[in-house]
Image (cartoon, rainbow, N blue to C red):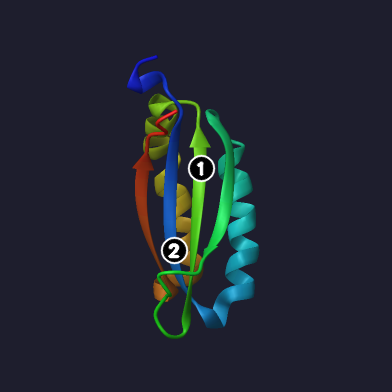
Amino acid sequence: MSANQAEVVYEVSLEVDAAIEAEYLAWLRAHIDEICALPGFLGAQWLRVEEPAAAAGRFGLCVQYRLRDRAALEDYLREHAPRLRADGVARFGGRFQASRRILQPLA
């Protein structure tokens, strides 16, 4: 199977103000469900980051989305990501930071 046809993991690392934890987690759960309903998504796992520790007054999260292949990820990034990312910014402004990685499983 070529690299374009193999499953990929799209990882989003988040650092969030502790003051909005309950509200952010409720929103994030629905956000993950919305993304996982899109074509090409196989599921997601969300995790609290214990180490490295987040900055004082913040907490860390990591969401790992599994996708069918790189083409499905590219469709998501082109067709859906701008709108979904804008929703989080509109709701929470600068009270969180996100970074993203694309990972290729070895087996």
Q: Which mark is residue 65?
A: 1
Q: Is residue 75 above or below residue 54?
A: above
Question: Secondary structure under badge 2?
Answer: strand
Residue 42 rendering spot, x and y as whole percentages? 58, 33
Residue at screen point 55% across, 29% down? 39
Q: Is residue 50 above or below residue 10?
A: below
Instruction: Determine whether label 2 and label 1 are within 8 Å by CB.
Output: no
Q: Quadrant of the C terminus?
A: top left
Labels 2 and 1: the sequence-earlier one: 2
Q: Is residue 35 above or below residue 30?
A: above
Is disc 1 surrounded by few (<14), some (14 to 19) or many (20+) residues within 10 Å? Answer: many
**Residue annotated with mark 2:** 14
When asked about the image quadrant of residue 4, the answer is top left
Residue 21 rendering spot, x and y as whole percentages? 58, 75
Seen from the viewer's position, the closer of residues 6 and 78 is 6
Q: Is residue 58 left or right of residue 44?
A: left
Mark count: 2
Task: Using the numbered discs, state the Cα–Cα distance from disc 2 to disc 1 in whole angstroms.
Answer: 14 Å
Residue 12 rendering spot, x and y as whole percentages? 43, 53
Seen from the viewer's position, the closer of residues 9 and 21 is 9
Residue at screen point 65% across, 64% down? 26
Q: Is residue 89 left or right of residue 30?
A: left
Seen from the viewer's position, the closer of residues 40 and 43 is 43
Residue 24 rendering spot, x and y as whole percentages? 58, 68
Q: Quadrant of the N terminus?
A: top left
Is disc 2 surrounded by few (<14), some (14 to 19) or many (20+) residues within 10 Å? Answer: some
Seen from the viewer's position, the closer of residues 34 and 53 is 53
Q: Amino acid at mark 2?
A: Leu
Residue at screen point 51% across, 37% down? 66
Q: Amino acid at mark 1?
A: Tyr
Question: Secondary structure under badge 1?
Answer: strand
Most distant residue in the top direction: 1
